[in-house]
Image (cartoon, helix red, strand yellow):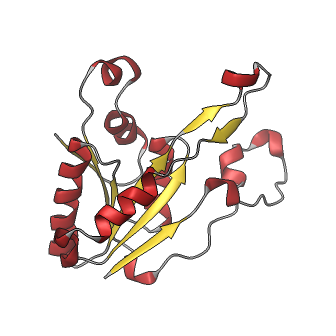
Amino acid sequence: MAAHEFSDSADRKRRPVADPAATDPLAAEEPRPGCDPAFKHGVVVGFDGSTSSERALAYAIGMAGRSGSGLIIVHVANRLPTTVWAGCEPPVFVDVPDHRTEVLGLELACADYLAEVPWILVERGGDICHELEEVGREYEADAIVVGSTHGIVGRIFGSVAGRLAKRAQRPVIVIP
């Protein structure tokens, strides 16, 4: 069984808040529409096509298969501040066109190894850690699986896996 769900973080609607100064702006967002019940308590995996994310996907497939749950594959598209181009204040984020999700979706749809479990592909834009945790919350995921970051960028800015492990409200499994 294969499916694709493409959603954009810009589709979020705002709901009235009693005291906007006292709340977190992310908490003021209206919850997304209900997700497919077949994927409730599934396994969320971050996937970008890299070698480490492919290893994480392989582990997540096995985990979902053993637990009899669905697999929620999440690709987080790039977002850049408009101040990079315009030099304006305050920074506003714009979604950079990312056709990589479509390519990843087609590759995944043709993959034989995904025939073992029901899966969906969810596209988000924004901070990777926040979006993975948000998808985990929406689907009431049993775990989030990510690949480890290697190289100097991860050491300087902190890896996604490390940041996610610190903030997540559910188990995070980091695959080397």
Q: Is residue 28 above or below residue 91?
A: below
- Is residue 114 visible in the rendered image? The answer is yes
Residue 50, horizontal then vertical, whole percent: 27, 43
- Is residue 142 visible in the rendered image? The answer is no
Q: Residue at x 85, y 53 (%)?
A: 18
**113, 155: nearer the viewer:** 113
**Which quadrant does the N terminus fall into?**
bottom left
Left-right relation of 126 to 40:
right
Left-right relation of 32 to 82:
left
Q: Is residue 134 above or below residue 159?
A: below
Residue 8, horizontal then vertical, whole percent: 61, 58
Residue 34, horizontal then vertical, whole percent: 57, 76
Quarter-of-image position of residue 108: bottom left
Marks counted in the figure total 0
Q: Residue at x 80, y 22 (%)?
A: 89
Left-right relation of 23 to 120:
right
Q: Is residue 92 above or below residue 134?
A: above
